[in-house]
Amino acid sequence: MKSMRLERLLSNLGYGGRKEMAMAIKNEWVSVNGEVVRNPAFAVDLDIVRAGGVKLDGEKIDPISPFTIMMHKPAGYTCSRKDAGDLVYDLMPERFKLRKPILSSIGRLDKYSTGQLLFTDDGDLLHRITHPKTHAKKYYEVTLRDDLKGNEAELFASGEFCMTEDDKPLKPAEWSANDARSGTIIISEGRYHQVRRMFETVGNEVITLNRFQTGSLALGDLEEGKWRVLNADDLDSIFA
């Protein structure tokens, strides 16, 4: 598709329903390459949209699909659209929840974990990051209830380590201790509550869990509760 009706474009980006966006256009709130457009059926070239040439109420509209963001998740937020309580989607602009195609999380963090979360409307990217053959490595900072036993790195790296209630061994993981009760772990798969369950299996308990990197894409200095749009270089770094 090389072009799209202007009112449909804005509606797909979550700014409002098509009738609402048609009214906004008729009210001269939308411009294309600096020129006010009054016809909701105007076919806007998507290359112009990608170049930032469409503005709503004087502000550039959000990027069209494929669209990917990185968030710094605080503790206490759930990776869900519908659960009770605080949700990660509450940290985004309301329009992000209404985008078509929808914006989905790439993997999850449990309610009490913090750090890097990625969201995308690009199914191919989601598949590449999570598929077992191309699964991007994920990096976590861990603090523990009890002192380490000293054999965790060997166990986790063996390729033969099974978590409680699992029959299939985990792929080798890299554990590096910082002190008696903390360290960094790097995993290359994404089983349910994997890091917490790994330490439960060896008789310990994870107290804090913070994901700070996926592939070579680091969370960096992004503030807790904030998000930013990822560019092509960011996406390439996930698989670097």
Image: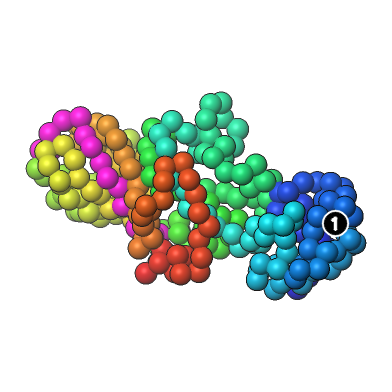
**Magenta region:** 134-149
Residue 92 coordinates in the image, percent (x, y): 57, 43
In percent of the image, x 70 and y 73: which residue is there? 47
Q: Quadrant of residue 220?
A: bottom left
Left or right: where 99 falls relative to 4: left
The residue that mark 1 highlights is 28
**Up-down relation of residue 126 to residue 161 (above or below):** below
Residue type at mark 1: give it: Glu
Residue 174 coordinates in the image, percent (x, y): 22, 54
**Up-down relation of residue 225 to residue 33 (above or below):** above
Mark 1 closeness class: few <14, some 14–19, many ≥20 residues within 10 Å: some
Q: Quadrant of residue 181?
A: top left
In percent of the image, x 85 and y 56: which residue is there? 28
Whether the magenta-drawn stretch holds residue 175 is answered as no
In percent of the image, x 75 and y 70: which residue is there? 33
In percent of the image, x 56 and y 63: which residue is there? 124
Q: Residue furthest top?
A: 84
Residues 80 and 87: in front is: 87
Residues 1 and 161: in front is: 1
Residues 29 and 238: in front is: 29
Left or right: where 135 falls relative to 23: left
